[in-house]
Image (cartoon, coloured by chain):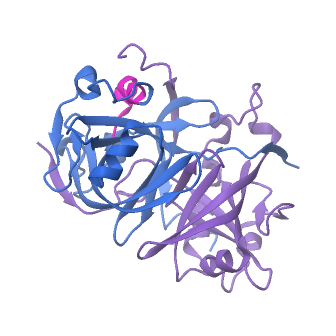
Chain colours: A purple, B blue
Amino acid sequence: MKKSLGAKTFLYPTPVLLMGTYDGDNKPNLMTVAWGGICCSVPPCVTVSLRKATHSYGSIVSRKAFTINIPSSDQVEIADYFGIESGRNTDKFKKAGITEVKSDIVEAPYGEEFSIVLECKLLHTIKIGLHTQFIGEIMDVKASQSIIGKDGRPNLEKIDPIIYDTGGRNYFSIGKNIGKAFSIGKNTK
Amino acid sequence: MKKSLGAKTFLYPTPVLLMGTYDGDNKPNLMTVAWGGICCSVPPCVTVSLRKATHSYGSIVSRKAFTINIPSSDQVEIADYFGIESGRNTDKFKKAGITEVKSDIVEAPYGEEFSIVLECKLLHTIKIGLHTQFIGEIMDVKASQSIIGKDGRPNLEKIDPIIYDTGGRNYFSIGKNIGKAFSIGKNTK
């Protein structure tokens, strides 16, 4: 018998994504987003949801592009910082010591120090409520050589991404490999 | 200097969500979804993306409701199973030994053995490409007493959710608590 907790955003896990944008004055910004994820395989698309009050909201609307930077667990302090300061009056790249790189395919910046970055072009804007959802087509993924495995793909343990705990408002690291997808369920089948 | 990996769905982490639906014949189904997440705080909403070819696609379209069940790491085998068998001709609840519970607020079933469940009413349908995105309003969250912490909220370590590794196609468990959100970034600020 389960207990009702009410209508809450208790989904586990949620990611810690740093969204990179330029505003109308070409000022770069990074903002922490936990409301997001992949939403289509072909074309590859990612979704991020923002409140209209944020500085990044206007930047996406005007530039129609953004990047998604994946911070690692040893970058957890600056990942949190990008969520608690507004980019309206501050150069958060500079303050956090992150090197701004202008994407060569979309009008958005990313941080050189993040090991994996998705460069996205705005496809859809869906007004839901407090948050508006932006769907971006992933035009390219740029990765540091250090997190690419022998198979040529990103290695999750090397990326060492952060998990956001929506109930307790904590950050967690990744644990251990517990099985092969599309494989370990075959016994039940 | 980063290396281009092409336009791929390399986002980290992605969740492992089990979506519960009834089809037109009231047959219950659970399907594994990694393309999803929270997309609005007010009203609380969750998004899941499905291919049109899946059995669950037609069920959501006709019943306008679904549940999101969060499996724990010790349920990883059945979590994978729900992704590799179609519910078209099989009662996957029965085969996996999961007890079907009919939600009392939306027209969808959930699994009693999953410690936390979101009951959702379909709000928006967005056709993107191979995947269609369904946005559901979270009408209630039901949780097992065992995963509720002293603060009355779900405890992430007790839920022990699974992470899907999109590059390597592995499942991972949660690691350790690495900091307090909206707090540890204050030094940088």
A12, A73: nearer the viewer? A12
x 52%, y 81%: residue: A52
In magenta stretch: residue B102: no
Q: Name, please, the residue furthest toward the top.
A: A187
Do we see residue A131 in this rendering? yes
Q: Answer with the quarter of the image where residue A10 lies.
A: bottom left
- What range of the chain is rendered magenta? B70-82
In magenta stretch: residue B79: yes
**Whole-percent x, y for residue B113 in the image:** 22, 33
Do we see residue B178 in this rendering? no
**Whole-percent x, y for residue A29 in the image:** 71, 73
**Whole-percent x, y for residue A41 in the image:** 61, 44
Instruction: Note whether B138 is above or below A174 in the view shown.
Output: below
Say whether residue A41 is left or right of residue A29: left
x 83%, y 60%: residue: A105
Placement of the C terminus of chain B among the 4 image quadrants: bottom right
Instruction: Note whether A170 is above or below B117 in the view shown.
Output: below
Say whether residue A29 is left or right of residue B77: right
A39, B177: nearer the viewer? A39
